[in-house]
Image (tube, rainbow, N blue to C red):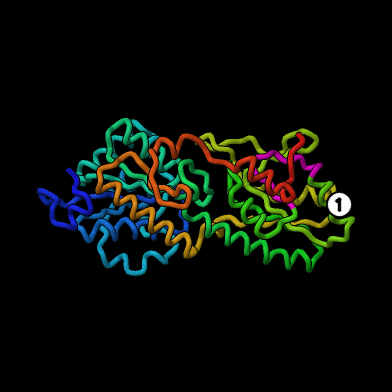
């Protein structure tokens, strides 16, 4: 039986046993990943438990590539961007016949009592399947700058990404005004427009294009023409990489998919800028922020949030509550079943879109 933290601290844990816990950070990097590892380790290591970091997400378990994390590594970890474990998009269920057995062998060889998976829907989806199909003791921690996981109000990394995009839009507005141009800023968000919407509203973008509502470009052209007729010399548009663009009811966005069945993204801002310049006659430029949105040191909010989630994941481990994900609900740290977190993609609600209607280019395809 796994002793609880309270029992261990009181010396009433029955037969003393050091837990062996593996941790991985899957998917893309996000500000706050190191803080989550810090929250996990600072709870476990003082109680005598051992923490093994697997490199580059699930690839580390597939290849048994790990090292034991020592207490000295937590000295300033909370403030550092990226992830000391390395990120990666490997998923054992991409080639399940080969890689799932290798993951299970690594867990057995390392004598792991549990695994903490920190990541988005792909990472946590694999975690849920390993728990359900093979009885692996797993706890999840939600991470994605896209903020599109269910079961939690927010995911860490999102706040830093929004702040970075907001500042970029603010700065780009100055050059837009200097040259009397439209600046079209492309933000991350394949299926959900959280970053684009929050940053676009915060920076007072003249229009915000998100995947949740397909965009009829004729409506956007009309809005920009009204601004120009009113004497505006410049404008800034915030566009999600997954925005679906129509002109006169004809889909312009790509319908091509990658090897995982996901829509290919990128180039939407260039398409919008080209259309605006041709149809409205207003000089336009596209800016793709790309990985700048997920780079660098996390904001204080993301540091503290991720630290708390990591610490709660440790509590779930110590209480033997596996198959769950640490989360934020109504501003408090809680936990939900992993299955709930990966059941669907969480998108912007109609309530949010309607509330900020003045900022959004709405569809009429």
Residue 230 shows up from this direction: yes
Residue 261, horizontal then vertical, whole percent: 53, 34
Residue drawn at (29%, 45%), measured in percent from left and top? 115
Residue nearer the viewer, 58 or 341:
341
Q: Which residue is mark 1?
A: 226
Judged left or right of residue 109, residue 163 is right
Residue 363, horizontal then vertical, whole percent: 74, 38
Q: Which residues are magenta?
A: 207-219
Judged left or right of residue 344, residue 94 is left
| Quadrant that contains the C terminus | top right
Residue drawn at (67%, 64%), measured in percent from left and top? 170
Q: Quadrant of residue 242?
A: top right
In the image, is residue 230 part of the stretch drawn in magenta?
A: no
Residue 279, horizontal then vertical, whole percent: 84, 47
Judge whether 224 appears above or below 127 on screen. Answer: below
Label 1: how many Cα within 10 Å (few below 14, some 14–19, many 20+):
few
């Amino acid at each position: 039986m796994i002793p609880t933290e309270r029992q261990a601290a009181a010396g009433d844990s029955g037969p003393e046993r050091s837990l062996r816990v593996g941790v991985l950070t899957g998917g893309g990097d996000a500000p706050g990943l190191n803080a989550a590892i810090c929250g996990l380790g600072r709870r476990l290591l003082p109680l005598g438990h051992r923490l093994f970091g697997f490199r580059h997400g699930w690839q580390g378990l597939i290849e048994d590539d790990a090292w034991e994390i020592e207490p000295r590594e937590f000295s300033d970890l909370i403030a550092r961007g990226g992830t000391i474990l390395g990120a990666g998009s490997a998923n054992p269920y991409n080639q399940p016949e080969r890689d799932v057995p290798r993951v299970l062998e690594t867990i057995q060889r390392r004598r792991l009592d549990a695994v903490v998976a920190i990541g988005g829907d792909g990472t946590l989806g694999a975690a849920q399947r390993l728990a359900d199909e093979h009885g692996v003791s797993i706890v999840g921690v939600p991470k994605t700058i896209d903020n599109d996981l269910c079961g939690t109000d927010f995911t860490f990394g999102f706040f830093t990404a929004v702040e970075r995009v907001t500042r970029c839009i603010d700065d780009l507005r100055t050059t837009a005004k200097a040259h009397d141009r439209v600046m079209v800023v492309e933000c991350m968000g394949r299926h959900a427009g959280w970053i684009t919407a929050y940053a676009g509203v915060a920076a007072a973008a003249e229009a915000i294009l998100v995947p949740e509502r397909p965009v009829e470009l004729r409506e956007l052209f009309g809005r920009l023409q009204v601004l120009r007729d009113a004497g505006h010399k410049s404008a800034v548009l915030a566009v999600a990489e997954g925005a679906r663009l129509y002109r006169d009811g004809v889909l312009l966005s790509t319908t091509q998919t990658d090897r995982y069945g996901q829509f290919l993204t990128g180039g939407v801002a260039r398409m919008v800028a080209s259309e605006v310049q041709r149809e409205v006659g207003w000089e336009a430029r596209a800016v793709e922020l790309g990985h700048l949105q997920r780079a660098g040191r996390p904001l204080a909010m993301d540091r503290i949030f991720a630290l708390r989630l990591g610490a709660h994941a440790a509590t779930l481990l110590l209480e033997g509550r596996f198959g769950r994900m640490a989360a934020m609900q109504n501003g408090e740290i809680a936990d939900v079943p992993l299955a709930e977190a990966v059941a669907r993609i969480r998108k912007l609600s109609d309530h949010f879109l309607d509330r900020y209607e003045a900022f959004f280019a709405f569809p009429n395809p």
